[in-house]
Amino acid sequence: MSGSFQEIEFHPSGTLNNMNLATPIDPNTGQSGNAFNLINTSSSPLVITGFSQGPASINTSDTSVIMEVYTTTGDYRFSPVWTLVGSNIVNLTTSAATGYTPVSLISIPVGDTVGIWIGRTTGILGYTTGSGIPGISPRAQNTDLTITEGHGGTYPNGVQFSPRNWNGIVHYGNPNSIQDTIYFIKQTGDSTEFYRSDDGGNTLINFTNGWPNPGTGDEQKRTEIAVSPAAPNKIVALATGSANGGSGLYGIYISYDKGE
């Protein structure tokens, strides 16, 4: 393809489709943190990308809380070797899971289990007195993942109390469904063109529906586009150029279907 590419925008090539599994938010007691198992019940490997923590003790808000996430291979109840995989300073909210901590990718093969300990370095988190078997009984589950009931305890990695159930959201993805979409902007003459690839750049498709089309004597030679994993099909394009004797902003364009 001839012409100069003024910018390449990645949406975001090689990112996971985001999925979540939430527990009930029903704390009635608390300590520094929780241990529990994550069990992959899907037909594909899963990757854990982060955890959103529920309220502080017992069901209260708190600010500037230092959260840490640890993992161990296999069931946490049997000789765990804890590894710190994520930390963040978060705000905790009454009756909600808002304290997000991203983690270094935790991979769970099909049918396997990993142990998790999540807690705060000082202070108390809210959690829930359970009624099942720690590490086995489901606290929350869907077709992909099971969060088990667990233990509560003191920082770090304490498991003094059971059954104690975590309050929060597990964020995860399926690496087999990695999105490989890339957006390109090409300058041609006095206008720009929009292209999308759904196979990592091997093939490109030009989409023109609603794209800026300058008239005679006008110019539209630069376009910046923005995309977000939170809304992967939405594209915002900021076009600059000149029209009707003026210059600067040519227009702002939004697509909700990946440019189609």
Image: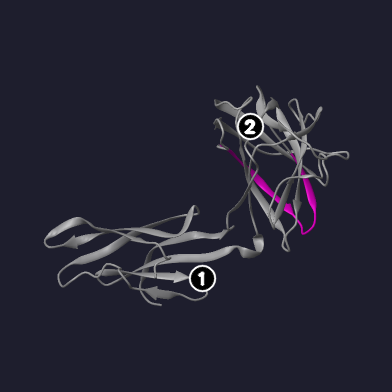
Residue hosting label 2: 67
Residue at horizontal 70 percent and vertical 32 percent from the top: 128
For the residue marked with disc 2, what is the amino acid? Met
Residue at horizontal 83 percent and vertical 47 percent from the top: 74
Q: Secondary structure at mark 2?
A: strand
In the rendered image, residue 144, in percent from the top left (x then y), is placed at: 69, 57
Q: Is residue 74 left or right of residue 189?
A: right
Q: Give how far apart the Cα atoms at labels 1 and 2 are.
A: 37 Å
In the rendered image, residue 174, in percent from the top left (x then y), is placed at: 65, 59
For the residue marked with disc 1, what is the amino acid? Asp
Q: Tell me: residue 248, above or below residue 1.
A: above
Give the magenta-colored segment's residue range: 99-116
- Residue found at the very far left of the displayed protein: 245
Residue hosting label 1: 198
- Residue found at the very far right of the displayed protein: 78
Tell me where residue 160 sits by quadrant: top right
Q: For the C terminus, give its image quadrant.
A: bottom left
Q: Secondary structure at mark 1?
A: loop
Q: Tell me: residue 75, above or below residue 28.
A: below
Q: Tell me: residue 184, above or below residue 107.
A: below
Residue at horizontal 44 percent and vertical 70 percent from the top: 196
Q: For residue 68: magenta?
A: no
In the rendered image, residue 116, in percent from the top left (x then y), is placed at: 74, 40
Which mark sits nearer the N-terminus, 1 or 2?
2
Q: Considering depth in this image, is 35 or 200 the residue closer to the camera?
A: 35
Q: Is residue 171 left or right of residue 241?
A: right
